[in-house]
Image: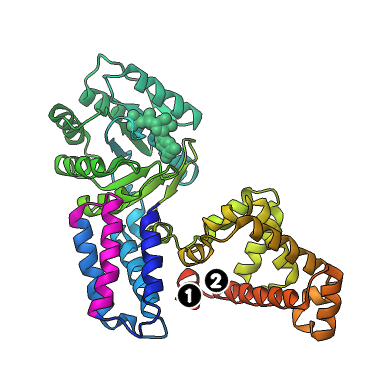
C-alpha cells in the first residue's frame, strides 16, 4: 500500500525518539513527511490539507498525554484520523446496504468501464443471496457492448441468482423499467442494475445513467472505482457524485499493487462511505469495508488478521488456527507455541515474506539484516527448543543455569545463545499478551519508539 508513508513514519518515529513531548516544531516535521507521502500516493490535495490540519489539531491537543513517546503518539493520531478519513467517523452502520424500499430494493451500479462493475454486480448478488437470504435479479443496461450483457448473465448464473435478459436494441431506461416490473411480479427482494461504462467521463453517459436513476429511484447508487487509479479516480468520483445522488462506494482491486491513494480521496471527494472492497477476480472476493483495518494496512502496522489468514492458507493450517485461537482465547503461550511459530515462519515464505506483515518499526529494524543469517538463526532456535524436555517447554521459567548448560550442550551452542533465545521468547510472550488484550494500538505502544 502506501509504502512511502510507512517508511516515512518509521523514520520520524525514530528521529523523534529523543524528544520528551510533542511540540509545534517536531510535529510540523513529522506532518511534512506525512503530507509528502500522501501526495506521492496520489491522494487529492484538498483531502491531504484537511487531513494534516486535523492531525495537527489533535496532536497538539491533550490526546497525546500519557505514557506514549511523542513519535508513537503521533502515529496513533495519524492512524485514527486515517480511519476517520476512510469512514470510521460515520459509525459501523455506514457500510450496510439499505433495503428501505418497497421491494424490490434497487441497487444501481455506476462507474467507468473496466473498473469491475459487472464483476462486482455478480459478487453483490452472491453476497445478498448467501449472507442476506435475498432473492436477487440482475439486469444489464449496457446497450453498447453486447459482450457486457453476456458477461453479466454468466456471473449471475454462476452465483445462482436470476438474470433479466436485455438486448442492444433496447433503451437503458426501458430495460430498467421492464426489469423492475418483472422483479415485482416475481417477488424479488433486490434488483441490481449494471450500467454502461465509458473509458472516460462523457456527458451523454452521465445523462443516460441519471435518466435510469430518475426512472427507477434506487435506494442504493453505488459508485464502483478501481483502487489502482490515482488522480483519475478523484476526477471520476467528482463527476459521478455531481451527476447522481450516490449512496456509497465500492473500491475494487484492492488486492492489486495499489498505491492506496484512491481509498483516501474518494471518500473525501464524495463524502459517501466506502461500503465494500473488491479483493479478487473471483466472485467471493468482496469484503465489507473496514476503515480501521484499512488504516492499519495503509500504515503498515502489521495486520495480525492478515497474518493469521496467510498462515491458514499455508501448509500447516491446523497449527496456525490453534495458535490464533490461543492468542484470542487468552491461553498460555509456551515454548511449544514459540517453536510452532518459528516453524510457521519458515513455511510462510521465510523471514522476508513474514517481514512484510510486521509493523513498520520492525521492518525498519530488520532492513539491511542478512536474511540468510536470520533463517540460520531460526534453525538454531528450533534446535535449542528441541533440546528442552517437555516440562521445560511447557514452563520455560524452570530453565535455570544448570538446565541452560545442558540445553546448550544438547543443541551444540553457547549458553549465551540459549539466554538470547529465552529473551526473545519473553518478548514474543509480552507481545502476544498485548495482542490479546486489545490489539495493535496497544502493541504499538509497547514498542520502544
Ligand atoms: P466493468 O467493465 O466495470 O464491468 O469491469 P469488469 O467487471 O468486466 O472487470 C474488469 C476486470 O477487472 C476483469 O478482468 C475483472 O476480473 C477484474 N476485477 C474486477 N474486480 C476485481 C478485484 O476486486 N480484484 C481484481 N484483482 N480484479 C478485479
| Residue 26 position in % (x across, y down) | 28, 76
* Residue ID for mark 1: 442
Q: Estimate the x, y position of residue 42 in percent, counting from the top left.
A: 27, 49
Q: Position of residue 6 (x, y in %)?
A: 40, 60
Q: CA distance from mark 2 to mark 1?
A: 7 Å
Specify the farthest residue to the top: 169
From this view, report whether residue 192 is shown above or below residue 4: above
Identify the residue under disc 2. 435
Pick the front one: 195 or 232: 232
Q: Regarding mark 1 in the picture, which secondary structure is present there?
A: helix
Quadrant of image for the C terminus: bottom left
The secondary structure making up most of the magenta span is helix
Q: Is residue 341 left or right of residue 43?
A: right
User: Which residue is drawn at the image coordinates 28% and 41% (left, top)?
Assistant: 223
Q: Are marks 2 and 1 in contact (CB under 8 Å)?
A: yes
Q: Position of residue 374 (x, y in %)?
A: 64, 60
Q: Which residue appears at 36% of the width and 48% of the height? A: 259
Q: Which residues are magenta?
A: 24-46
Amino acid at each position: 500500500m502506501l509504502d512511502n508513508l510507512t517508511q516515512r513514519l518509521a523514520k520520524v518515529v525514530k528521529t523523534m525518539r529523543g524528544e520528551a513531548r510533542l511540540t509545534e516544531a517536531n510535529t510540523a516535521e513529522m506532518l511534512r513527511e506525512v503530507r509528502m507521502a500522501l501526495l506521492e500516493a496520489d491522494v487529492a490535495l484538498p483531502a491531504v490539507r484537511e487531513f494534516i490540519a486535523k492531525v495537527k489539531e489533535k496532536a497538539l491537543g491533550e490526546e497525546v498525554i500519557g505514557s506514549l513517546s511523542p513519535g508513537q503518539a503521533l502515529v496513533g493520531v495519524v492512524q485514527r484520523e486515517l480511519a476517520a478519513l476512510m469512514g470510521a467517523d460515520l459509525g459501523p452502520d455506514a457500510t450496510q446496504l439499505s433495503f428501505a424500499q418497497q421491494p424490490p430494493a434497487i441497487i444501481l451500479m455506476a462507474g467507468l468501464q473496466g473498473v469491475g462493475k459487472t464483476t462486482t454486480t455478480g459478487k453483490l448478488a452472491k453476497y445478498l443471496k448467501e449472507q442476506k437470504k435475498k432473492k436477487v435479479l440482475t439486469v444489464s443496461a449496457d446497450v453498447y457492448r453486447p459482450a457486457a450483457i453476456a458477461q453479466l448473465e454468466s456471473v449471475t448464473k454462476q452465483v445462482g441468482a436470476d438474470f433479466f435478459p436485455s438486448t442492444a436494441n433496447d433503451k437503458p431506461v426501458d430495460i430498467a423499467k421492464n426489469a423492475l416490473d418483472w422483479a415485482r411480479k416475481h417477488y424479488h427482494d433486490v434488483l441490481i442494475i449494471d450500467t454502461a461504462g465509458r473509458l472516460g467521463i462523457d456527458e451523454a453517459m452521465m445523462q443516460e445513467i441519471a435518466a435510469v436513476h430518475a426512472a427507477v429511484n434506487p435506494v442504493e447508487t453505488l459508485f464502483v472505482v478501481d483502487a489502482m487509479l490515482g488522480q483519475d479516480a478523484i476526477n471520476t468520483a467528482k463527476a459521478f457524485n455531481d451527476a447522481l445522488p450516490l449512496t456509497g462506494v465500492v473500491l475494487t482491486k484492492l488486492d492489486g499493487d495499489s498505491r492506496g491513494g484512491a481509498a483516501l480521496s474518494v471518500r473525501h471527494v464524495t463524502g459517501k462511505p466506502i461500503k465494500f472492497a473488491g479483493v479478487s477476480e473471483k466472485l467471493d472476493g468482496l469484503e465489507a469495508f473496514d476503515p480501521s483495518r484499512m488504516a492499519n494496512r495503509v500504515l503498515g502496522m502489521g495486520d495480525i488478521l492478515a497474518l493469521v489468514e496467510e498462515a491458514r492458507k499455508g501448509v500447516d493450517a491446523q497449527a496456525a488456527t490453534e495458535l490464533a485461537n490461543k492468542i484470542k482465547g487468552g491461553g498460555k503461550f509456551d515454548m511449544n507455541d514459540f517453536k510452532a511459530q518459528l516453524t510457521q515462519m519458515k513455511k510462510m515464505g521465510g523471514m522476508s515474506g513474514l517481514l512484510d506483515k510486521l509493523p513498520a518499526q520492525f521492518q525498519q529494524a530488520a532492513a539491511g539484516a542478512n536474511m540468510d543469517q536470520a533463517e540460520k538463526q531460526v534453525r538454531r532456535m528450533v534446535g535449542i527448543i528441541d533440546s528442552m524436555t517437555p516440562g521445560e517447554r511447557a514452563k520455560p521459567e524452570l530453565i535455570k543455569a544448570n538446565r541452560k548448560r545442558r540445553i546448550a550442550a544438547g543443541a551444540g551452542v553457547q549458553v549465551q545463545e540459549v539466554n538470547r533465545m529465552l529473551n526473545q521468547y519473553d518478548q514474543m510472550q509480552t507481545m502476544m499478551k498485548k495482542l490479546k488484550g486489545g490489539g495493535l494500538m496497544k502493541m504499538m505502544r509497547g514498542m520502544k519508539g
